[in-house]
Image (cartoon, rainbow, N blue to C red):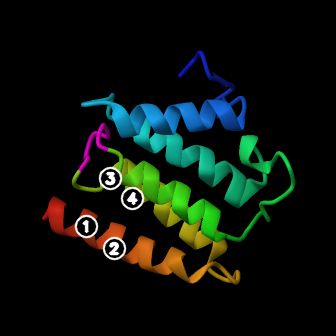
């Protein structure tokens, strides 16, 4: 993580894509790596910061289809700590994103992803 980030934020889109690819291809990974990758998306969606803001396509405070697809890739990555179940750290990031964008005209796929991910977390932690 130190190699691809500075001050808790990934340096570039390429580094973020590398991080996601590592999660997708790894047989296992440290428990917080998936939550760290989700945090990178949260930085952009909530605060308008980070590599996803480069190019000006992302609108802070709103979740578009591209961000939902990236979040889905991270959550479904094989190497994540939960890899089948959503972890507490992952759920917390998703709740923060949802709380901060609830009034926005988010892509409809966000609600589906959020509800399914949180339902998975609740079912697997019970």
Q: Dots 3 and 4: beta carbons under 8 Å?
A: yes
- Based on the picture, tell me whether residue 81 belongs to the magenta stretch: yes
Say if 90 sits above or below 115 in the image. Answer: above
Residue 11 position by quadrant = top right
Q: Residue drawn at (48%, 65%), measured in percent from left and top?
A: 95
Tag 3, which secondary structure? helix
Q: Residues within 10 Å of mark 1 (few under 14, many from 20)?
A: some
Tag shown at residue 88: 3
Residue placed under numbered mark 1 in the picture: 120
* Magenta segment, prevailing SS (helix, strand or loop): loop
- The residue shown at (45%, 59%) is 72
- Per the image, label 4 sits on a secondary structure element best described as helix
Magenta residues (range): 78-83
Residue 92: x %, y % from top left? 43, 57
Q: In the displayed structure, does residue 102 sit left or right of residue 95? A: right
Q: For the point 33% across and 73% down, which residue is it?
A: 116
The residue to which callout 4 is attached is 91
Alpha carbons under labels 1 and 4: distance apart: 9 Å
- Residue farthest toward the left in the current orientation of the protein: 126
Q: Which residue is mark 2?
A: 116
Mark before the other along the chain sequence, 1 or 4: 4
Single out the residue that lies furthest toward the right.
Answer: 56
């Amino acid at each position: 993580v130190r190699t691809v980030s500075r001050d808790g934020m990934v340096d570039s889109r390429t580094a973020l894509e590398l991080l996601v690819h590592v999660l997708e291809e790894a047989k296992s990974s440290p428990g917080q790596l998936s939550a760290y990758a989700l945090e990178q998306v949260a930085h952009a969606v909530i605060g308008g910061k980070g590599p996803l803001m480069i190019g000006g396509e992302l609108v802070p405070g709103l979740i578009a289809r591209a961000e939902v697809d990236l979040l889905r890739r991270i959550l479904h990555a094989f190497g994540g700590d939960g890899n089948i179940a959503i972890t507490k750290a992952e759920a917390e990031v998703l709740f923060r994103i949802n709380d901060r964008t609830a009034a926005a005209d988010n892509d409809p796929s966000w609600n589906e992803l959020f509800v399914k991910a949180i339902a998975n977390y609740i079912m697997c932690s019970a």
